[in-house]
């Protein structure tokens, strides 16, 4: 039986599922923590375990497709670097996994492959120009322009999280100040809230910080839903930055739809 093992590999989780070529979508999904701070070797071992768990006994032939954080070189299967993956510099991930499993492996920027999925099967169907934006541990994106995924000269196009939105703003994980990822991704929202708490702002998040030793964007979202003013203001600030970012992208690419 021919099939594809699809892997979503991010700074927080690794997800893998097997898709048979001629059957309904999978009902099983392997999800495991990335534990990115442990470095490439440990993470690659977890990637292999996740993929192994999805190989069916009757799989005669299969291929592996991986969406991973960039910047990366999709043509040569190399993760060039990643702000959210400690120690990942010029890692030849495609070749390592292909050698281990003995099958073809395809590596793409996670947001780019998500953009392709939405364009072909989801909310972007029927369009020739769309922008997909993902906001999580980091911010990424993919651009479909005139019916083609925009890759650029070195395969690095579409790094939409690394565009400057706040001049001389907070330092991004890539080392540049003021990128949208540095002011509106999950960890950035948490850092903003923490700095305001340390400055003496009143909030129920102080109790969360005391109990957990940290606060996350999930904590802030829950507090905002409960009416916490600091949490609401922090999320609103991030939302304003994202709105400005979308306006800039609209001028640059003239998409039919944002996803």
Image: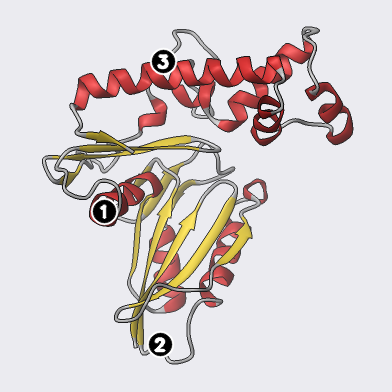
- Tell me the quadrant of the picture where the N terminus can be found: bottom left
Q: Position of residue 212 (x, y in %)?
A: 84, 35
* Left or right of residue 63: residue 210: right
Q: CA distance from mark 2 to mark 3?
A: 48 Å
Q: Position of residue 202 (x, y in %)?
A: 80, 11
CB contact under 8 Å: marks 2 and 3: no
Residue drawn where x is 49% and y is 21% of the image: 239
Q: Pointer 3: residues within 10 angstroms few (<14), some, or many (20+)?
A: many
Mark 1 closeness class: few <14, some 14–19, many ≥20 residues within 10 Å: few
Residue 155 % position (x, y): 26, 43
The color scheme shown is: secondary structure
Q: Quadrant of residue 254?
A: top left
Q: Secondary structure at mark 3?
A: loop
Question: In the drawing, does residue 27 fall left or right of residue 192?
Answer: left
| Circle on res. 75 | 1
Indicate which disc, 2 or 3, sits on the residue closer to the N terminus: 2
Indicate which disc residue 165 carries. 3
Per the model, the C-alpha gap separating discs 2 and 1 is 27 Å
Give the number of the mark in front: 3 or 1. Answer: 3
Q: Residue at x 40, y 72 (%)?
A: 25
Q: Is residue 179 visible?
A: no
Q: What residue appears at the point 29 percent right and 47 percent down from the top-left corner?
A: 123
In percent of width and height, residue 216 lies at 69, 33
**Whether residue 159 is situated above or below residue 46 in the rendered picture:** above
Secondary structure beneath label 1: loop
Residue 59: image tag: 2
61 lies left or right of 130 = right
Circle 2 — which element?
loop
* Local crowd size for mark 2, using a 10 Å CA cut-off: few (<14), some (14–19), many (≥20): few
In this rendered view, identify the residue nearer to me: 211 or 224: 224
Residue 85: image tag? none
């Amino acid at each position: 039986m021919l099939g594809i093992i699809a892997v979503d590999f991010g700074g927080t989780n690794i997800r893998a599922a097997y898709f048979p070529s001629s059957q309904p979508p999978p009902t099983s999904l392997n999800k495991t923590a990335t534990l990115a701070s442990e470095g490439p070797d440990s993470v690659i071992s977890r990637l292999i375990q996740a993929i192994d768990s999805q190989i069916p006994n009757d799989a005669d032939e299969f291929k592996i497709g991986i969406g991973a954080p960039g910047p990366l070189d999709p043509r040569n299967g190399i993760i060039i670097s990643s702000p959210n993956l400690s120690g990942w510099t010029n890692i030849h991930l495609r070749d390592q996994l292909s050698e281990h499993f003995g099958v073809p492996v395809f590596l793409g920027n996670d947001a780019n492959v998500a953009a392709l999925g939405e364009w072909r099967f989801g909310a972007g169907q029927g369009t020739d120009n769309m922008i997909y934006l993902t906001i999580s541990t980091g911010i990424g994106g993919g651009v479909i322009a005139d019916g083609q995924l925009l890759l650029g000269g070195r395969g690095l196009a579409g790094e939409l999280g690394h565009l400057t939105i706040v001049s001389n703003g907070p330092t991004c994980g890539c080392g540049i100040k003021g990128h949208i990822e540095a002011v509106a991704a999950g960890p950035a929202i948490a850092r903003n809230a923490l700095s305001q708490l340390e400055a003496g702002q009143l909030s129920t998040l102080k109790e969360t910080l005391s109990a957990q030793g940290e606060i996350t964007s999930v904590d802030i979202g829950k507090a905002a839903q409960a009416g916490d003013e600091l949490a609401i203001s922090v999320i609103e600030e991030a939302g304003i930055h994202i709105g400005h970012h979308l306006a800039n992208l609209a001028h640059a690419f003239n998409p039919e739809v944002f996803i």
